[in-house]
Image (cartoon, rainbow, N blue to C red):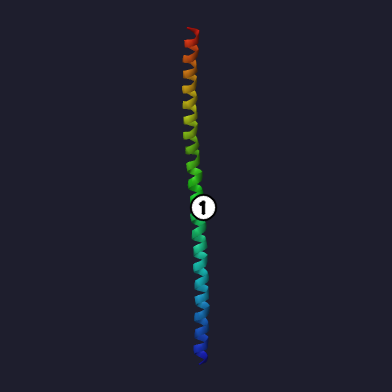
Amino acid sequence: MIRKNTSDKSNSNFRQQESAMKELDKNVETAEQRNISQAKNAIESPQQETDSEKLQKESFKQFQHSNQEFQQQESS
């Protein structure tokens, strides 16, 4: 009887520890996923900004070209 109680208590302690470890693993996995996601965003953001800058420069060039044509027409 004493052995059974000791065994039951040991099993209960083991299950509690196992459950706690599983919870820790979930938390670590979630944190790792969050870090990976943040790293991806940091890597991708500069490229998106570069694309935006390219669009702005191209738009400005087109504006300048149109403006020059307009000025040439007025001076003619």
User: Few, some or many C-alpha atoms within 10 Å of disc 1 (few <14, some 14-19, many ≥20)?
Assistant: few
| As drawn, 59 above or below 42 | above
Residue 73's spot in the image, x, y percent?
47, 11
Q: How many marks?
A: 1
Which residue is outermost to the bottom? 1
Which residue is outermost to the front? 74
For numbered disc 1, what is the local secondary structure? helix
| As drawn, 48 above or below 64 | below
Name the amino acid, label 1: Asn
| As drawn, 44 above or below 22 | above
Question: What residue do we see at 52% from left, 57% from top?
Answer: 31
Residue 59's spot in the image, x, y percent?
48, 26
Residue 50's spot in the image, x, y percent?
48, 34
Q: Relative to the observer, which residue lies in front, 41 or 18?
A: 41
Residue to which mark 1 is pinned: 35
Question: What residue do we see at 50% from left, 92% from top?
Answer: 1
Question: What residue do we see at 49% from left, 68% from top?
Answer: 22
Question: What residue do we see at 50% from left, 72% from top?
Answer: 19
